[in-house]
Structure formats: structure tokens, C-alpha cells
Amino acid sequence: MSTSPTPSLTRFTRRAALALATAPLLASMAGGAMAQAAWPDKMIKLIVPFPAGGPTDTASRIVGQKLAERLKQPVVIENKAGASGSIAAAQVKKSPADGYTLMMLATPTLLAPHLYKSAGYDTVKDFTPVATVYDLPIVVVVNPQQLPNVTDLKGLIAYAKTQKTPLNYTSSGVGSFGHLSMELLKQLAGFDMQHVPYKGGVPAITDTIGGQVPVMYADLVAALPHIQAGKLRAIAVGSPQRVTVLPDLKTIAEQGIKGYDAVSWGGLLAPVGTPKAVVDRIASEVQQILADKDIQDKLRGAGAIAYYQSSAQMGQRVQQDYTRWGQLIRDKGIAPE
């Protein structure tokens, strides 16, 4: 004679089977939660996609030191320069998404996929934005001996329009933010100048001071000491607002080019898939770091302006700048030499 399991035994068996089936998932979830809760428990690597000594490197070291103090773990800066930062970005893209590898994104690296077919990453899709850290204003400067009567943007445009051959200007290289910003200015203001690219901001500024090239669109951090020494004359700043270190310097928009906005900037990125809890923790720490007046002063001393945006806000900025400047690059046919 056959027997059937009792209802209570059937329910017990089903519950036991369900518990066995879900145990690995629950263990995995618990392990992930514990891992996030324990973060950080070892060194954090902050990759800077440019050489030591530049504005991106300086800002990374200022913020990285404070981040290490707050997280109670070392934050080690690793400089990995090349191809406008695309070598570093490609490395970060392949790094574990665990919060222990970060990169200080700067505008040239943001835009590199538009310029280098082999960049190896998509700025929008391959990273998780963490927080913006600084704005880096850029300024139009002239050699005061070569262009003694050019004291503002209107004067430069008027002078450029009188030349039989285009007036030369320089930047730190083809596709640099100074190059793109001047091309945008030329397009909006309806005048022409000839780009003479250099390999880096230092030689470009050196030759602008020396008179080999009379005009440059330069990073404020690099140009400021020479402006203060009278070797260069600043005639306009590309940001929507004036900068505190040069309060009398008018913006390009103030000088008649309405809506003009060209600001280089930097912010922390992590590999895509980095846990939200970790991203939020880093962003919160960065927000508090940038609220410190001492940090603001240190960044300002380097020519950068402390500027915090959340992960979501930074993501929107990445998308907007990637689209906007990418269109200019295509329209102008700009490509690295």
C-alpha cells in the first residue's frame, strides 16, 4: 500500500529546497555588502593622465592627500601620460570596479576619443563619474611688445581683421582645449587667425613671451605668473564668470560674444560598475574637502577653482561637453598631427 507525504512534510521540504537554492545568492549579497562596508581597507590608486607638475597633477595631489587623511588609507598618485591621457584612461577602463582605482579626468582626456581613433575607450560609457573637483579657466593672452595696442578682445579681433595674412596664435597642441576654444571663438566672432601648435604649454608660453607667436589661448595656471610679471597681457577669460585671481579681466561673453563658455575642468572617474555606495562615499568626502577654505586657497594658488558636482551632475557635464566639443572637432576637421 502506497503512502503520500503529509501536507506539513511537503511544506517543510519545499522550504528546505528554497533555502538551499537561495543560500549562495544570499551569501553573495552579504559578502558584497560586507565588502562595501569595509571599503577602503587598502591603498587607493589615483591615476593622473598627465606628467607631474601640471594643473591636473597639482589638483590631484592636493585633493588626494586630504582624501587619504579622511579615508585613513594611502592615496597613491600614479602619473601615466600620453595621447591626451587616453593611455591612462584605457588602463583605468580595464581596472577592477572596486573603488581602489580612480582617475582624475581632465578635458583633453574627456575629448580624446574624438581625436584618436585608437583611444580605446568611450568617455561616456566606460566610466562611472564620481565628482568634479575643479574648474581650470583658460585665458587669451598677447605679447605686450608685439601687440602693444591690443588691450581687450575687441582690439584683438579688429587687429586680426586688418591683416593681409592671418595673425598667428598658439596653444599647447592640436586638439588641445586652448586650440578648440580659440576655434570656437573665431567661429562665433567671425574672424580668422592661424593656429601654430606646440607640443605642450610650456614651450608655447615661452615662445609667446619671446615674441615668436603674438597670441596664445592658455591655461590660467600656466600663464598666471607671466601675466603677473607683465610678460604677457591677459585680454579675456573663457569662463562664464570672472576669476578671482584676475578680478578685472573681463570674460569673452562680457566682451560681446554672448553665450561663450569654454572651461577646462577635472573630476574623479572610476571604472564602470563601481558600487554606488563606494562612489557616494568618495563624492561625499570630496564635497567636504572642497568646502575647506585652505583647500580652495591651495587650488586657487595653482590657478584652479574648487568646484564640486555630484556623480549625476558630473555625468551630465561629461555628456554635454563630449557632444558639444566633439561636434566642433568634426566641423573643423581637427585631427592630431
Image (tube, rainbow, N blue to C red):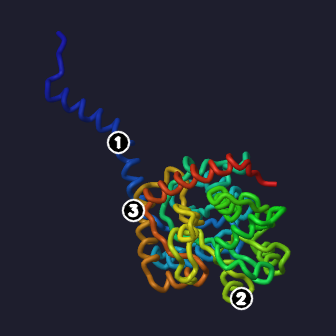
- Residue 100, compared with residue 70, is above or below; it is above
Out of 157 and 43, give the one closest to the viewer.
157
Out of 255 and 335, give the one closest to the viewer.
255
Q: Estimate the spatial distance between the alpha carbons at disc 2 and disc 3, rounded to whole Å.
A: 54 Å
Percent position of residue 304, x then y: 57, 76
Q: Which mark is residue 187?
A: none
Q: Is residue 144 visible?
A: yes
Left or right of 129 on screen, residue 20:
left
Which is in the foreground here, disc 3 or disc 1? Answer: 3
Left or right of 215 on screen, residue 276:
left
Q: Residue lying furthest left in this view?
A: 7
Out of 169 and 299, give the one closest to the viewer.
169
Percent position of residue 299, x then y: 55, 80
Say whether disc 2 or disc 1 marks the residue closer to the N-terminus.
Answer: 1
Say whether disc 3 or disc 1 marks the residue closer to the N-terminus.
Answer: 1
Q: Estimate the spatial distance between the alpha carbons at disc 3 and disc 1, rounded to whole Å.
A: 21 Å
Left or right of 277 on screen, residue 240:
right
Q: Residue at x 52, y 76 (%)?
A: 242
Disc 3, SS? helix
Q: Residue lying furthest top in this view?
A: 1
Residue under label 2? 230
- Residue 30, compared with residue 25, is above or below; it is below
Amino acid under label 1? Ala
Q: Residue at x 72, y 82 (%)?
A: 232
Residue under label 3? 37
Out of 325 and 158, give the one closest to the viewer.
158
Percent position of residue 311, x then y: 45, 59
Percent position of residue 10, x then y: 19, 26
Residue under label 1? 23
